[in-house]
Amino acid sequence: MNKFLKYTLLLIVSFVFLFPILWVLLSSFKPQSELFTYPLTILPHRPTLENYVNAFASGDFITYYKNSLFVSVVATLITITINVMAGYALSKFWFRGRDLIFYVMVGTLMIPLQAIMIPIFILLKNLGLLNSLWGIIIPPAATPTGVFLARQYLQTIPDSFIEAARIDGAGEFKIFTMIIVPLAKPIIATIAIFSFMWRWNDFLWPFIVVSANKKMTLQLALANFVGQFQINWGNLLAMTVVTMIPMIIVFLALQKYFVKGLTAGGVKA
Amino acid sequence: MKSRQRSHGTFEQTRAPLLFLAPNLIIFSLFIILPAIMGLRMSFFDWSILDGSKYIGFKNFRDILADSMFWLTLKNTLIYVVAVVPLLSISALALALPLAGEGKGMGVFRAIYYVPTMLSMIIVGIAWRWLLGYDLGIINYAIRLAGGKAVSWLTDGTMANISLIFVTVWTRVGYFMMMFIGGLQAIPKTYYEAAEMDGAGRFTRLRRITIPLLKPIILVVVVLSTIEAFKAYELIFVMTQGGPGTSTKFLVQYIYQAAFEEDRMGYGAAMSVILLVIIGIFTAIQFGARREEYTNE
């Protein structure tokens, strides 16, 4: 009986988490006329793709999609490269100021973008990076969390691996690419997933950097649509669903880790 | 070990770490450290894009203290923080407790509860606006079907705040739940077995074993959710735009308005400094409280 109650509660909570997403999905397949007529029905009477067709036909939705993909993929590649390199330098070498640099980096986690968005705007303006996708990509690429994760992980690699390669005459860069990177694959995957998710979902950086329509990312465009006086809900819901797709793919790729009980909790890149 | 590496360092080996570190360090210094310093400096200036800048000492801060809109947005933010942080922490723990085990289907529930955390705040806001619409939102529709009266979820000041708090918890609880699950799974099962043999009930075990051992994670969850709540902007941007009136207007929105809509960059920078200090104080209090707990034990 106790078990029955527990599962009933867990199912109710599941419904609370899933229904809003499901409702957006189902609504996006309803023709405009069904979206706003009583009585509402859970399933569309006349399922249609017209909202999707309109969303892609009207305006620059494909441009926004390309911008979002470009930013997320390129930024993730840069973040992985520079963070793993930094994590390697901070874990496997000794040099003056090493620990200080590490603690300063981690300490800046306390400084949210919201508190420095004004000087960042001025800085990007002076550097000519406003209204440029590079202005979204590069400034937040050096994530403290990424460095932290890479450093903690690389500390577990035995020094003897590196020393043996040095004795064999391998250069430092070669040691990094041939030994460290292959060993760091799990942490590279972790940083990549969280970086991609964050970039795809991010709103505030693009919001500060970009005002030109052609440079907008999906999140920016969606926020703009919802800010209009007359919201075209049919289009908006279709665009929302299409914007969710990459996250759903990431989720499906990750779900086995949740099910197996390995927790990714506490990770934020 | 450290000294051995140092003494063995050839020229290449002492140069290499700096080269590996350089790209990250340059971007980090240029776009985090430098803006932080610039922001602090700007707060002492009457700074505008159109009219240039002029040093005015502490005038921005004096003006802020006399600015009723600042106090209003600060009050709104604090109410939100004080509601969100405990609700979020407690519900995350409440969900983690049954799901930390390896019982049948627990993994599936973990995955389901994590879904909303993967969506952007913009998408979450759009979805809930769609659900909470007054006339045609499904929630009011269900209320009317059940014979109730439609609720102004987003157009009544109090209800709009409650809606924002609820949606924040809805979208963030899975993230903090996973942190708690990680912590719970690290507690040795033998502790519980021993306690059970001593006749400790479920509640006693929770109070005497789980909560004390989870304290470090509880602290992290509370600190992180506090910082997150003070930063809140995107959800409000999409769901209420600060309205109705100013009832959901928070500090970050006011900073944005002052700086980017009214071109009072220095004033906005000064409010940002205050925001940073408030976040710092809250974090320090939470760490302080934890130290006290240690010394009491």
Image: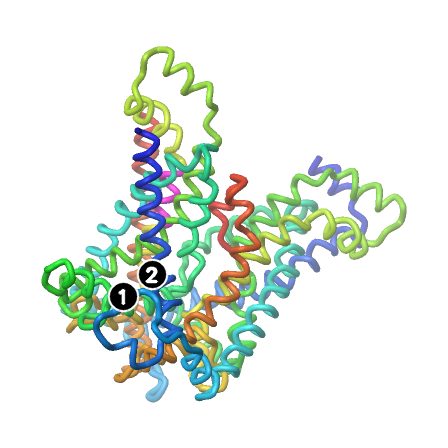
The residue located at (25%, 61%) in the rendering is B164
Whether residue B92 is visible here, answered yes or no, is yes
Whether residue B297 is visible here, answered yes or no, is no
Q: What element carries label 2?
A: helix
- State if disc 1 and disc 2 touch (CB < 8 Å): yes
Q: Does the magenta stretch include residue B218?
A: yes
A108 over B207 or under it: above or below = below
Q: Is residue A209 left or right of residue B149?
A: right
Question: Viewer-proximal residue, A105 or A4?
Answer: A4
The dot on residue A20 is 2
Label 1 marks a residue whose chain is B
Within-10-Å neighbours for mark 1: few <14, some 14–19, many 20+: many
- The answer to whether tags 2 and 1 share a subunit is no
What amino acid is labelled 1 in the image? Leu
Residue A174 is drawn in which quadrant? bottom right
Percent coordinates x, y for residue B85 in the rendering? 28, 48
Q: Is residue B237 magenta?
A: no
Percent coordinates x, y for residue A266 in the rendering? 47, 46
Question: Viewer-proximal residue, B196 or B187?
Answer: B196
Residue B148 is drawn in which quadrant? bottom left
The dot on residue B131 is 1
The residue located at (43%, 73%) in the rendering is A219
The magenta-colored residue range is B217-224
